[in-house]
Amino acid sequence: MTLMSVASSRRAALFGLAAFLSGCASGGHRLLSQPPALQQSTSSLQDLLALPPPRARLDTSVFRFLDQTGQHRPNQNFADYSFAVTQGAASILIHALRQAGSGTWFRVLERANIGDLLQERQIVRANRIEYAGPDKKALPELGPLLNAGTILEGGIVGYDSDVVTGGAGANYLGIGANVQYRRDTVTVSLRSVSTLTGEVLTAVETTKTIYSVLLDGSVFKYVGFNKLLQVEVGFSTNEPVTVCVTQAIELAVYATIMEGALSGYWAFADPATQARLTDAYLRANSGRTFQPPPPSGATPVAAASAQTHGVNHR
């Protein structure tokens, strides 16, 4: 075989390898590409949606729900200044509140961007003063805003990375595989505060575990004289941190409803259903005991909410 034929064979082999890798890359792109979709339905969201309606709908507000950990994304190779958890937890909390009981439990009032709302109302008020309606008559005054009977506060209070790490592997005659795993945890705190008295009515904390798994395998052996076969393949999966934070917040909303029902601050429309759900909630939280409702002189949150903005329901 001449040198020219050897060079041609090598070029053909390189072109063939490049075409193979290009095909794998394009095929992998088509395989991994997914169309946009709505939020995935989780077990915690299903529990929220399935809640029976309350005796009275609760008006509540969320001013802020921040990342209080201040932690950055863990990275063993270089300093990563991206935050470890989402900075939009307030939006996630508002969405979870609106899903409780398929929208029957909470009427959420806009407070996170209250400045934008007040500025827009000023524009509407100025237009109604300066301009007349289609019939040349003065436009009616802008009605009052609703007031919240409770304020929900708290935030993401903990993010612990590498709580558990480990791995296992084996290799025999140049053929082997190994698996590595890591476990992180995120903690969410949520409390409800009475607008009338400033009393903290309920306070709950929830924790969600975040799993990451890496699996890879390799083959390294001679298949003939001066012929070496080397193959590597790997796969990793990481639970999305935002999805885990969402589940922790959804569970916190569910627990807040149960804690308030146990303490008598609000109630389900059906007493028998409330007894069944709160009993299951207490049994799921081992070591918990029944909390008696507040004294008869205490004002329930539903009544307090009505007192703070009774003018709005005339």
Image (cartoon, helix red, strand yellow):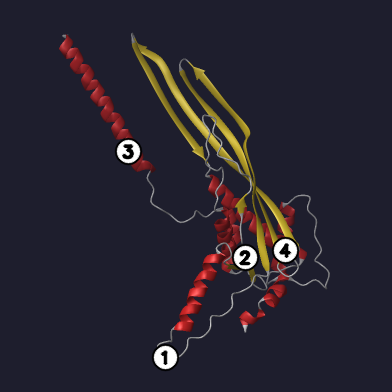
As drawn, 44 above or below 172: below
Q: Does dot 4 land on a helix, a strand or a loop?
A: helix
Dot in front, 1 or 4: 1
Q: Quadrant of residue 254?
A: bottom right
Rendering quarter of residue 256: bottom right
Q: Alpha-carbon neighbours of circle 2 within 10 Å: few (<14), some, or many (≥20)?
A: many
Residue located 37% across and 17% down the image: 229
Indicate which disc residue 27 carries: 3
Q: CA distance from mark 3 to mark 1?
A: 66 Å
Q: Is residue 209 above or below residue 313?
A: above
**Does label 2 or label 4 sit earlier along the sequence?**
2
Q: CA distance from mark 1 to mark 2?
A: 38 Å
Residue in view at x 59 percent, y 78 percent: 144
- Residue that badge 2 annotates: 61
- Judging by the rendered image, the residue that carries numbered circle 1 is 136
Q: Earlier in the sequence, mark 3 or mark 1?
A: 3
For marks 1 and 4 on the same chain, the one whose residue lies earlier in the sequence? 1
Quick one: SS at disc 3? helix
Mark 3 and mark 1 in contact? Answer it, CB < 8 Å.
Answer: no
**Nearer mark to the viewer, of 3 and 4:** 4
CA neighbours of label 3 inside 10 A, class few (<14), some (14 to 19), many (20+)? few
Q: Viewer-proximal residue, 143 or 39?
A: 143
- The three-letter amino acid code for the residue at tag 3 is Gly
Name the residue located 79 percent from the left edge and 50 percent from the top edge.
287
Residue for badge 4:
260
Q: Crowding near pointer 4: few (<14 within 10 Å), some, many (20+)? A: many
Which residue is at the front of the view, 53 or 153? 153
Tell which circle, 3 or 4, labels the residue nearer the N-terminal end. Answer: 3
Which x, y percent locates residue 266? 71, 68
